[in-house]
Image (cartoon, rainbow, N blue to C red):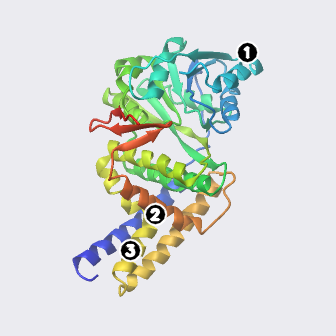
Amino acid sequence: MPGYPGLILLAFSVASLIYLLLAVYAILKFNPEARIEVSQTPPITIFKPLCGLDYMLYENLKSFCQQTYPNFQIVFGMADKNDPAIEVVRRLQKEFPDTDIELVINNRVTGTNLKICNLANMYPKAKYDLLAIADSDMHVENDYLNRIASCFDDESVGAATCLYSATPAGGLASKLGAMFINEWFLPSVLVALTFQKLDFCFGATMVVRRHVLEEIGGFDRLKSLLADDHMLGKLVNKMGYNVILISCLVENLVHEPDFVTLYRHELRWARTIRLVQPAGYSLSFITYAIPLSLFLIVFWPTCHAGYVMVTCAIILRLVIHSMLRSRLKLKNTSFQMWLVPVRDCLNFIIWVASFFSRKVSWRQKDFAIRSNGSLRNIEK
């Protein structure tokens, strides 16, 4: 494959190695356990929208009840009066009688994003002006709220968010799912934040001041959007407030029962990212160093640089794999070298597949993504 096509593929391979070097640098800089100073402890309302029994739901929710923080409220919400998660919340209310725990059951639907509909139904029960929203599959340390509070001494801060690591809780599909979060998502965000200001949020934790949420139009503004977490940060930033990163790393327990579930889950993520960052996502193939260098060998076998590229790509990916395990103190993540190229190739396959449809599956429901980012129900 001589000529311009071969040179372009070679350039892409070089760019992918540069990206991996930047990822190493960004990981070394990242310190999720940095010491914090909390000058004020404003009361905080935590929203926990629930739907069904996620894996280890009780343990995850319990971690939010065990906060060493003087004044906080937890509002749990769900739409179905027969949801099995209700019993988990009732158990927590009994075990933590001194914790202000509210349960909201309301099936009112105002849009196609059912999580946001749930939050809108929970909102009237919020007592405090600092609102934290966290996905149901997150596990936190007991200083979580202290770290949140440390971000809001500055009135220019309208919202805050935090990154998350993944712990596999299952077989090979779960391990690959955790690797995606730890070794692709997390480094890619750290590299991006090396060059740009944070202006979006992650569903792992979104914290917003009540008056700022109301200024952007409340939950009603997000009720039919797929990327509600991303857009919350964008809207807050557009209003002139800063969005900052909380100095903590929450834990996501990844339990993927099979490869089909894993594929659908990650395809939804991919199409969401493609929607909110179309240009950046289109160029994100640069992050798949191993597949790119393998393509270079396949299509230009006489290019000796290709074999050097493959070797360097594998070495750098293994370095990142090892660094993240030790630096982030990842649990249940044994060093398995053979999974690294498998994970990179799967990333590339999902990236390609994400361009062929606007359909996503979410909580056993199918949706189509409109061009404005809103969701449309697809009847089965």
Between 160 and 94, which is closer to the camera in this rendering?
94
- Taking 195 as reference, is 367 above or below it? above
The quarter in which the N terminus is drawn is bottom left
- Taking 13 as reference, is 48 above or below it? above
Q: Is mark 3 on a helix, strand or loop?
A: helix
Q: How crowded is mark 1: few (under 14 residues within 10 Å), some or many (20 or more)?
A: few
Q: Where is residue 369 in the image (x, y as percent from the top left)?
A: 33, 39
Check whether the beta carbons of the residues at disc 1 and disc 2 lie within 8 A of each other: no
Check whether the beta carbons of the residues at disc 3 and disc 1 lie within 8 A of each other: no
**Residue 295: which disc?**
3
The residue identified by callout 2 is: 20
Q: Residue furthest front?
A: 380
Give amino acid for label 2. Answer: Leu
**Residue 98: which disc?**
1
Total marks in image: 3
Q: How crowded is mark 2: few (under 14 residues within 10 Å), some or many (20 or more)?
A: many
Name the N-terminal-most of marks 3 and 1. 1
Give amino acid for label 3. Answer: Phe
* In this rendering, the label closer to the viewer, 3 or 2: 3
Q: Distance between the residues labelled 3 and 2?
A: 18 Å
The quarter in which the C terminus is drawn is top left
Q: Where is residue 366 in the image (x, y as percent from the top left)?
A: 42, 38
Check whether the beta carbons of the residues at disc 3 and disc 2 lie within 8 A of each other: no
Q: Is residue 354 left or right of residue 140?
A: left
Name the N-terminal-most of marks 1 and 2. 2
Whether residue 34 is visible, yes or no, is no
Name the N-terminal-most of marks 3 and 2. 2
- Taking 272 as reference, is 110 above or below it? above
Q: Is mark 1 on a helix, strand or loop?
A: loop
Give amino acid for label 1. Answer: Asp
The residue under the point 54% across, 12% down is 125
